[in-house]
Amino acid sequence: MKIDILTLFPEMFDGFKSESIIKRAIDLGKVTINTCNFRDFSEDKHKKVDDTPYGGGAGMVLKCQPIFDALKSVKKENSKVILLSPQGVPYNQKMAYELSKEEHLILVCGHYEGFDERIKSVCDEEISIGDYVLTGGELPAMVITDSVVRLIPGVIDEESHLNDSFNNNLLDYPTYTKPRDYNGMKVPEVLLSGDHEKIKKWREEKQLEITKEKRPDLIKPRFVLKKEGLKKSGRRIKIDDVKDIKVTIIKDNKNLSYKVTKEEKLVAITIFNPKELKGYKLKGKSKDGGITKILIVKKAFAFKVALKNIRKKIDVLANRLNTALFEIDEDKTRKVLAEAEMLKQMIINTYQDYIGKERLDGIIKNINQLVSEFVRSKTLHSN
Ligand code: 4GO
């Protein structure tokens, strides 16, 4: 990855680049971090980069020309240009993950009172690292660079960021190191037990407990079901593939939560009203193997919807059979019979879980009757 930083104060990045993990990432060739002083691009004879604001007011405003030209000199086809500003999208771990996949980032650091609004037209994104004002975009640029570089494969042990706070929307669990007893403060017994199952469970519970306590906003319910339909509430749980997803109920003294795991790994924890919990079912839709929405659907509701969908599909089939009755083309007859066969298979695959075996058998029998009636009439007609 390459990161270019447009700044009036390139020296601010010297320490940042020459220590610890960032230094190692540079030495390993995982990232190249260059600073570009856009003052060098100023066409002004005094190398001025700012001017007074139109309409009056205090302070100086960064001019378009030096930044536009500096950008032109570093920008390539695959570059993502990011402007650091308090008005930007609030930065988070998910954005860090997305940015870590980019080939080339250009971070534009403003200074003084701000920049000419037209500078935004040459930036792809505007990001803020938090709700406060700084004297320049340099610290935000370092924050973003740091959070992104550590996620580049091979920079740090992948395991160490799998459990980071904010992954799965949960804060990290507590960790301890030697000694077991420090001035009377003891390491929790479970961590010394060597029982990995128990440790995993303890850590998940701690994650939930700490997040509920410190950042309840991270575990707001994603979906709440009303009597006759789904009411969206907050975020959706996103999971790559619905396969291998398990939902278990966690109880603590106050709340009931759903713990959603995929291949044994914790994906999300959702809190639901315990009264609404009964009979709910996890349902997912996979979109070309990508992100999946998980809805919590009440069984009775899923049953109703499934029956309605099946009825619609049988109606369509019945219509097609009726039309095909008066067709002479044998190919068309074969086709509609194949469709009937496919519909049966589809219903079995898709709806069995929702409507139960008994209801399903009845529906398949119905379709078989439709088909045999069609075949009988067809034989009569051709005779
Ligand atoms: C970014 C830039 C705060 C942020 C900034 C932030 N302050 N919250 N100041 O990410 C233009 C002049 C913006 C100084 C800059």
Image: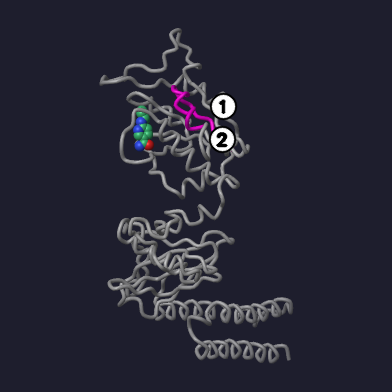
Q: Quadrant of residue 252?
A: bottom left
Q: Could you say whether the residue bearing mark 2 is in a helix, strand or loop?
A: strand
At a point 33% along the width and 56% down the height, the residue shown is: 183
Q: Position of residue 152 (x, y in %)?
A: 57, 45
Q: Is residue 5 magenta?
A: yes
Q: Earlier in the sequence, mark 1 or mark 2?
A: 1
Q: Evaluate if marks 1 and 2 touch, with contact meaning CB atoms under 8 Å apart.
A: yes
Highlighted range, magenta: 1-17
Q: Quadrant of residue 179?
A: bottom left
At a point 36% along the width and 61% down the height, the residue shown is: 186
Q: Quadrant of residue 381?
A: bottom right
Q: How has the structure been colored for display?
A: one colour
Q: Position of residue 369 (x, y in %)?
A: 59, 91
- The quarter of the image holding the C terminus is bottom right
Judging depth in this view, the residue of 245 and 366 nearest the camera is 245
Find the distance from the CA under tag 1 to the CA under tag 2. Answer: 9 Å
Q: Is residue 15 above or below residue 237?
A: above
Q: Is residue 106 above or below residue 371?
A: above
Q: Position of residue 113 (x, y in %)?
A: 32, 25
At a point 32% along the width and 56% down the height, the residue shown is: 215
- Three-letter code, disc 1: Val
Q: Residues within 10 Å of mark 1 (few under 14, many from 20)?
A: some
The residue that disc 2 covers is 79
The residue that disc 1 covers is 74
Judging depth in this view, the residue of 286 and 107 nearest the camera is 107
Judging depth in this view, the residue of 245 and 211 nearest the camera is 211
Q: Could you say whether the residue bearing mark 1 is in a helix, strand or loop?
A: helix
